[in-house]
């Protein structure tokens, strides 16, 4: 991987190095490596290690634990985009006989299928996968702990089911599908299910003494789609760029955007923490910044991938210890450091190549009752509705062939915006999901529900 560290300013590079140095020292990690991505390219790599001499670089493998789930989710989304399955399909339709087939594929992706968090004992992360050769060994006698679809409950067995689904529909092992459909197209040649030199060893650091214990590195067997992968900061930097922008060879920008969209009901504590879950991706609000990605851990290893799509900055942080540094906080700080020290420079404003008169007729100020809104045409051919002051409902709308517009997000997602016209063809008002928007507050000539008082506006006297 080509180093492009000179792209960042010296002060920014020093701040990044200081942050990971503090994390490694205070977290007592045998080693910690990190990378930062900006504009789709790795622009910084850093490492701190307890071993004198050559430190790990962007080619050294670490176990990435549950970041593996995001890879598995991408494989499932590819099947959806090909029309092989629908996210609303129950698992039973494609993978019968599991005992958990009532849950939909989307619910499995979002951890809302009601399944247990872990497989039955012994602890699967520290025992050979050969102890759980069948799906029934992973799920146990009572797969469901909660009603399907009612709450977010993180489930490792749920992603084992998704891996089995991929194998069933592709007719090949999960590992082979992963390599053919994600790793090779994206050039992730240092990502694998088994460690390949050079790789870090996994360690447990004594909580009350500066002593270490080697951790076992088990093959997870059936549980592999939930956490098996080894990777590097170099490969994960490329994967982060893909998750932010999409790649038509693997998954479109629209589909990765769908993965980054909240899909799970948040627990009360999650609401307080500003965290939720999409389709194979964790989502959080931290210091006013929306971050997406995934964390991972297995005995001996910690991993984190954090992306701010709005800032076009991502961070990868890996460490070879069972516990210690809080890599989620480190990743968020690396993103913040770059985003604040070297804010994204916007593209130059350019006028549209073509102007649609019908669209121009709709833009400008509108009122829903007495609430003032602005309707603006965007460079990508959409209409964007937003309140002119304070908070309120906002959405973008996509044009339909019949002159209506469909909401793409928020309260108005899926709702129709319909321009209603007078006999002379001019626009009288907008009907948005039964709400009437007029050019003036409660315009008397518009069909405002309940009518408008004929005496009009008046003072208190």
Image (spheres, rainbow, N blue to C red):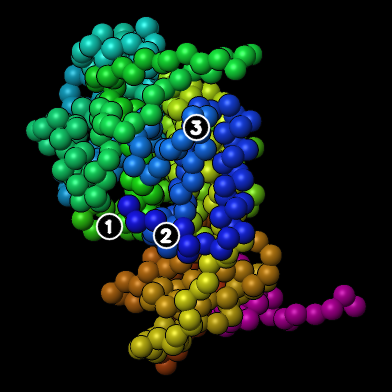
Residue located beneath label 1 in the image:
247
> What residue did someone put label 2 on?
4
Q: CA distance from mark 1 to mark 2?
A: 22 Å
The answer to whether any part of residue 54 appears in the image is yes
Residue drawn at x 51%, y 16% as measured from the top left = 212
Does 439 appear in magenta? yes
For the residue carrying disc 2, how many other residues have a C-alpha within 10 Å: few (<14), some (14-19), or many (20+)? Answer: few
Among the two numbered marks 1 and 2 on one chain, the one whose residue lies closer to the N terminus? 2
Magenta highlight: main SS: loop
Q: Which residues are drawn in magenta?
A: 438-461
Q: Mark 3 highlights which residue? A: 52
Depth check: give the residue in front, 276 or 74: 74
Q: Residue at x 64, y 13 (%)?
A: 208
Q: Which mark is residue 229?
A: none
Residue 200: x and y, percent? 38, 29
Q: Nearer the viewer, residue 238 or 408?
A: 238
> Which residue is pictured at 37% across the width and 7% down the height?
121
User: To which quarter of the image does residue 408 belong?
Assistant: bottom left
- Count of picture labels: 3
Judged left or right of residue 51, residue 171 is: left
Relative to residue 285, is residue 85 drawn left or right? left
């Amino acid at each position: 991987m080509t180093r492009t560290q000179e792209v960042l300013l010296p002060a920014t590079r020093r701040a990044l190095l200081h942050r990971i140095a503090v994390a490694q020292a205070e977290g007592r990690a045998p080693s910690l490596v990190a990378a930062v991505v900006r504009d789709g390219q790795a622009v910084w790599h850093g490492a701190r290690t307890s071993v004198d001499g050559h430190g790990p670089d962007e080619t050294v493998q670490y176990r990435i634990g549950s970041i593996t789930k995001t890879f598995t989710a991408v494989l499932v989304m590819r099947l959806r985009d090909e029309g092989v399955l629908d996210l609303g399909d129950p698992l039973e339709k494609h993978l019968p006989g599991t005992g958990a087939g009532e849950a939909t594929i989307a619910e499995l992706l979002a951890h809302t299928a009601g399944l247990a968090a872990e497989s039955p004992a012994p602890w699967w992360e520290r025992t050979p996968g050969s102890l759980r050769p069948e799906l029934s060994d992973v799920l146990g006698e009572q797969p469901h702990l909660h009603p399907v679809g009612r709450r977010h409950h993180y489930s490792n067995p749920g992603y084992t089911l998704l891996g089995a689904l991929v194998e069933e529909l592709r007719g090949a092992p999960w590992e082979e599908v992963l390599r053919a459909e994600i790793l090779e197209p994206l050039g992730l040649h240092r990502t694998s299910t088994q460690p390949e030199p050079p790789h870090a060893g996994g360690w447990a650091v004594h909580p009350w003494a500066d002593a270490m214990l080697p951790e076992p590195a088990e093959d997870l067997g059936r549980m592999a789609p939930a956490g098996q992968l080894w990777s590097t900061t170099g490969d994960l930097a490329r994967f982060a760029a893909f998750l932010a922008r999409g790649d038509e060879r693997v998954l479109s920008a629209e589909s990765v955007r769908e993965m980054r969209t909240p899909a799970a009901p948040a627990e009360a504590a999650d609401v307080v923490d500003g965290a939720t879950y999409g389709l194979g991706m964790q989502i959080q609000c931290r210091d006013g910044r929306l971050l997406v990605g995934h964390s991972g851990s297995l005995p001996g290893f910690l991993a984190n991938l954090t992306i701010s799509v709005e800032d076009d900055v991502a961070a990868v942080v890996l460490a070879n210890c069972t516990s210690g540094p809080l890599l989620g906080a480190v990743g968020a700080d690396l993103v913040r450091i770059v985003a604040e020290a070297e804010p994204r420079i916007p593209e130059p404003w350019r006028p549209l190549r073509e102007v649609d008169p019908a669209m121009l007729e709709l833009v400008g100020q509108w009122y829903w009752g007495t609430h003032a809104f602005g309707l603006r045409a965007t460079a990508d051919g959409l209409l964007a509705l937003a309140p002119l002051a304070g908070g309120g409902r906002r959405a973008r709308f996509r044009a339909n062939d019949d002159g209506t517009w469909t909401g793409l997000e928020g309260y108005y997602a899926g709702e129709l915006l319909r321009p209603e016209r007078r006999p002379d063809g001019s626009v009288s008002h907008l009907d948005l999901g039964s709400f009437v928007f007029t050019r003036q507050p409660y315009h008397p000539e518009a069909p405002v529900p309940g009518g408008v008082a004929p005496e009009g506006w008046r003072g208190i006297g």
